Image (cartoon, rainbow, N blue to C red):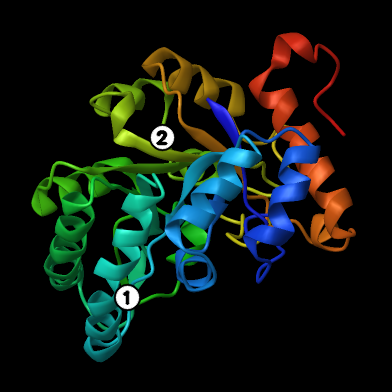
Amino acid sequence: MYECFSSGHLGFPGKSIRDNVPLAVKYGYEGIYFDIKRESASFSPSEFTELLAENKLKNGGFELPVEFRKDRETFEADLKTLRSCCGFAEKTGSTRCLTYLLPFSNTLDYKANFNLHKERLIPVAKILEEHGIRFGLEFVGPPSLRRGKAHEFIHNLDGLNELLDAIGTSNLGYLLDVFHWDLAGQVFGDFKKIPGPEWIVMVHLNDAPKGLSAEEQLDQSRELPGVTGVLRIDEFMRGLRDLKYDGPVSVEPFSESLKAMPFEEAVKTAKLSMDKVLNPKANPASTAL
C-alpha cells in the first residue's frame, strides 16, 4: 500500500495539482489523486506525466467526471466528455477511476434505482474499460443517511456486489472506506467476498467521533484515522494486508478541526495520522495525535 495525497479529501477543494505536488513531496506521500477535468484542461498529457515523474509521484487516479445521480440531460452531457478525459488518463498512466453511490432515493424504489444505476454505469464502465481504467465504486454505510428517506438503496458490500455483477465489465472493483465499512456492519470475514486485491481500486482511512452510536454517526463528521479508536481500523487493515492489497490509500476525515488549519499544517497532520495506521510497528506509541 502507498500513501496517496488528495487536498479535496482533506477538506481543501479547488486546489490544483501545482498547489499539491510540492506538499505531497515535502511530507513523503508516494502518490497523488487529481481532478481530471481541471488538469486535462491545464496540461498536455506529456506535461502532466513529466510533472509526476520529476517529483517521483505515482498516479493515484481520479474521480469519475460523470454525474449519473441526477437528471438524464446532465448524465448524457457528461458522458459525451468522458472519452476525452479517458484519453488523457490513458496517456498519463492513470488507471483508477472512483465514484460513490447514494444509499437512498426519495423518488425511486430499490428495483427502479438499481436498474437506473445499471443502465447508466454500464456505458461508463465500458468506456473506462476501453482505456484500461479500473472503476472503483463505493457504498456509503451510515444509517443516518437513510433515515427519513422514502427508499433505501445500496449501502453495504453485498448490495454493491450485486450491482457489480449486473454491470458485468472486467474493470470493476471497490473504493473501500473504513468509515462506511464499519458503519455498514461489515466484519473481517467479509473480506472473503472480495475476489482478489485487484478488485480494490482505492482505500480511504478516517475515524469516527466518540460518544455516538452507529445510528447517530453523520457522514460528513469524521476524524483523522486512529485518533479516536471508534472504528475497527486494525481489523480493516489486517483484511487489506491479508488480501495483499498494494494500491493507494488516502485520508478522508471530513474534520472541521483539520479544515480550520493552514493548508500545509493539515497536510502534515493527515500524513502523520496515516503513517501511524499503516506502519504501527514503526509507531508503537499511542495513535492519538
Circle 2: element type: loop
Q: Is residue 21 visible?
A: yes
Is residue 161 left or right of 22 when viewed as pictured? left
Q: Residue at x 35, y 51 (%)?
A: 91
Question: Is the residue marked by circle 1 packed among few (<14), some (14-19), or many (20+) residues within 10 Å?
Answer: some
The C terminus: image quadrant: top right
Q: Residue at x 80, y 61 (%)?
A: 259
- In the rendering, which numbered label is found on residue 53? none
Q: Residue at x 20, y 56 (%)?
A: 125
Looking at the rendered image, the disc whose residue lies closer to the viewer, 2 or 1, is 1
Is residue 45 left or right of 204 when viewed as pictured? left
- Measured as percent of width and height from the top left, residue 270 is found at 76, 42
Is residue 109 left or right of 50 when viewed as pictured? left
> From what the image shows, is residue 58 above or below residue 39?
above
> From what the image shows, is residue 111 above or below residue 286?
below
Residue 175 in which image quadrant = top left
Q: Is residue 214 visible?
A: no
- In the rendering, which numbered label is found on residue 186? 2
**Amino acid type of disc 1?**
Arg
Disc 2 versus disc 1: distance between alpha carbons? 25 Å
- Measured as percent of width and height from the top left, residue 205 is found at 60, 39
- In the rendering, which numbered label is found on residue 69? 1
Judging depth in this view, the residue of 227 and 147 nearest the camera is 227
Residue 65 in which image quadrant = bottom left
**Amino acid type of disc 2?**
Gln
Circle 1: element type: loop
Judging depth in this view, the residue of 77 and 206 nearest the camera is 77
- Measured as percent of width and height from the top left, residue 226 is found at 72, 32
Residue 26 in which image quadrant = top right
Dot 2 or dot 1: first in sequence order is 1
Judging depth in this view, the residue of 147 and 283 nearest the camera is 283
